[in-house]
Image (cartoon, grey):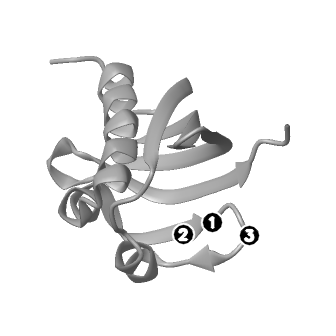
Amino acid sequence: MRPDEDVLRELNTRIGVAETEGDREFLAEVIGPVLAFRRANGVLVDRASFLDGVKPSARRETEVTSVTLHGTARALVTCTVTLVDGEQRREFDNVRLFVRADGGQWRLIAWANEPVEA
């Protein structure tokens, strides 16, 4: 069995790919039944609103900066997501809270991001 830190790093990288590809099915699977999401513009949305907004978009590059396990069923992941659109690159700091659900799968239940100031 792979260490949880490796699983969470890969999962967070895959979230960026799924956002880029508009893969709503994958995101619906990894997001818990309830989600608190803070968009970079400060707007708070729930799970349904987040998933409704998923569509193919500019490429995302995700760099996981830390994975902190809290016990065996909670983890906090921080990462920098770079949105690449042609020559334009915008960076966002992300903080993501995961819990281990029934069956041992990690589920995202809280996510906040904000633009990195240049």
Q: Residue at x 34, y 63 (%)?
A: 32
Q: Amino acid at mark 1?
A: Arg
Mark 1 and 3 residues: CB-CB less than 8 Å, in contact?
A: yes
Q: Find residue 42 and name its label.
A: 3
The residue that disc 2 covers is: 36
Mark 3 and 2 residues: CB-CB less than 8 Å, in contact?
A: no
Using a 10 Å C-alpha cutoff, classify the residue at mark 2 as few (fewer than 14 neighbours), some (14 to 19) or many (20 or more). some
Distance between mark 3 and mark 2 Cα atoms: 12 Å
Using a 10 Å C-alpha cutoff, classify the residue at mark 1 as few (fewer than 14 neighbours), some (14 to 19) or many (20 or more). some
Residue 24 x %, y %: 25, 65
- The secondary element bearing badge 2 is classed as strand
Q: Do we see residue 70 in this rendering?
A: no
Residue 93 x %, y %: 67, 42
Q: Amino acid at mark 3?
A: Gly
Q: Quadrant of the N terminus?
A: top left
Residue 7 x %, y %: 29, 28
Q: Do we see residue 1 in this rendering?
A: yes
Distance between mark 1 and mark 3 Cα atoms: 5 Å
Name the residue furthest front. Answer: 87
The residue that disc 1 covers is: 39
- The secondary element bearing badge 3 is classed as loop
Q: Residue at x 36, y 46 (%)?
A: 15
Q: Is residue 36 left or right of residue 49?
A: right
Q: Amino acid at mark 2?
A: Ala
Who comes first in sequence, dot 3 or dot 2? 2
